[in-house]
Structures are given as C-alpha cells and as structure tokens.
Image (cartoon, helix red, strand yellow):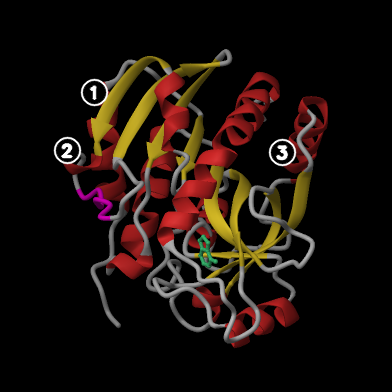
Amino acid sequence: MKTKQFTRQDFETAAAYIVAHTAHRPTIGLVLGSGFGEFADAIADADIIPYADIPHFPRSTVEGHKGRLVIGRMEGQTIMVMQGRVHFYEGFTMEEVTFPVRVMRAFGVDTLILTNAAGGLNPDFRAGDIMLIEDQINLLGLVGNNPLMGPNDPELGPRFPDMSTLYDRGLRELALSVAHEAGIALRRGVYVGLSGPAFETPAEVRMLRILGADATGMSTTNEALVARHGGMRVLGFSGITNEAIDQIDSPRVTSHEEVLETGKILVPRMITLLRGLLRRIHHP
Ligand code: HPA
C-alpha cells in the first residue's frame, strides 16, 4: 500500500502551530489511552489545542478519546499531553497514527510516556492491574505495516534503528520505584500490538501467549517505535481492562464498554503513578 509520505516540513509546520498557541515549552509528552483522558484535567495553566486545528494532525473517532493536546504544568514539570490518540483500525495509515509523535519530537519533547488499555494474556494478570511495558512485539510492523517503511529522512533517525532496548531502562527502574513507594503492585511484561478492531479469538489469545506476550492492545507499538527512531526516551504502561478469553464457548465476552468501565477503576492508580513519575523524572 503506497500512501502519502509526510516530510520533516509537515512535522515542523504542525509543531510551529503549537509553538504559536502556547507559551509552554514541554520536554515530556504523554499519550493517554482509552479511559485515561481524565489525567489531563488536573494540568495547571493549561493551553488546550484540538487536534482538528493543528495542520495535518489526525482526528480520533473513538469514544473515550477526546482528541486534543493539553499543554501545561504538573508536579513541577511542563508536559504535553495527548488526550486521545488515533488507531490503525480507524483507517489511518501508520504514518498518520505516528504523526503526533514526530510533531512532539519536532517541538522539543525528548521523553514520551505511553499509556493504553489492554487485554491481559498472562494468566496471572487480573482486570484492574497495571503493567509496565518492558518490551513489545509489533506484530503489525513485522508483517509489513511498519511506520518506518518508505524513504528515510536521516535528520529524523537512522534507516535501521536499533530496538534492543526500546523502553528506556532508567525510566522503567524509576517507574518500579515510584510504584513501590505508592504501594502499587506494578506488573511487568511484553505488550503485543495488533490492528483490531475485533478482539482476539481464543485461538489467537493462546497464540499470543506462545509468542511471549503478556498483554495485548491496538495501539502503542508504532508510537513507541517512531519515538525511539527519533531518539526519544520511551516509557509505557498498560491498564489491564479485561482478561483475554482463551477458550471458546465461554460465558464471558469482551466489550469496549467493559474496557472503559475497568479503565475508570484504573484511573486513580494510573494518575498516582504518572504524578509520581513526573515528580522524580530527571532530564537526560
Ligand atoms: N484485546 C485488544 N485490545 C484491547 C483489549 C483486548 O482484550 N482490551 C483493551 N484493549
């Protein structure tokens, strides 16, 4: 599939629009997944920019995703928060899905914290757990839907970027320490990114376990990949909103409503974790 290739000029145009609409100069970016948008409501001195106003920026169509940038201060840090993201399953290309990450980079953000709602594959995980993403399987990318395909602009990152440590070690250690102090039992594991929008069949769930994945969702992996390609530090958390169903004829079903409902239960702990991180994060 050949699609429009964004250029550095496009990222810079979008970043320039943001520069013109806020006096804040954040270096930390956060992406709030399904149900976690509430975090942004506590940002002080907030400048709010709807995605629809930013040149080339994709607009989310999913319930639970507000679709705006909130830029301001929290816990002594200046942050840029994406309240909602767009997904491949909405019909966006991988380039569009990851466009905001490139814009953040062009703006000067060097640290990206990604959050998502995910299904628990690891049988030890329960709905309501939070998982620190230690590594990922970008299943979509591995089979040809990789946002780094196409001509590479070396100013943005290398042609063949190393991904041996995608999620930053120092930030992962900090997250574990913050969680420990806050009394939050943080799970750890591998996130597998799929396209969705259908939830997995039980056979697919069992396959994903064999591949080594602990949680599954429809976002994050491509944003993480592009952020790392651009030299950003990346950290990620999955809110486990449901336990993936691994047997057919189960009386249970998986629904977006369940994902949003459990997401609500997760919000206070996710917010505690993110606030704790902001208090202690240092700049490289
Ligand atoms: N599968 C895929 N994506 C998800 C799930 C799931 O079970 N839960 C929340 N997002």
Does residue 196 sit above or below 119 in this rendering? below
N-terminal of the pair, mark 2 or mark 1, is 1
Secondary structure that dominates the magenta span: loop
Give the side of residue 85 with respect to residue 13, left or right: right
The numbered dot on residue 53 is 2
Residue placed most toward the observer, 160 or 101: 101
Q: The C terminus is located in which quarter? A: top right
Which amino acid type corresponds to the residue marked 1 in the rendered image?
His
Label 3: how many residues lie within 10 Å, few (<14), some (14-19) or many (20+)?
many
Q: Is residue 59 magenta?
A: yes
Q: Is residue 35 magenta?
A: no
Residue placed most toward the observer, 253 or 89: 253
Name the residue carrying label 3.
Answer: 171
The numbered dot on residue 21 is 1
- Residue stretch in magenta: 56-61
Q: CA distance from mark 2 to mark 3?
A: 32 Å
Is there a contact, CB below 8 Å, between mark 2 and mark 3? no
Residue 172 visible within the image: yes
Does residue 244 sit above or below 248 in this rendering? above
Comparing labels 2 and 1, the label whose residue is closer to the camera: 2
Which amino acid type corresponds to the residue marked 3 in the rendered image?
Leu
Is there a contact, CB below 8 Å, between mark 2 and mark 1? yes
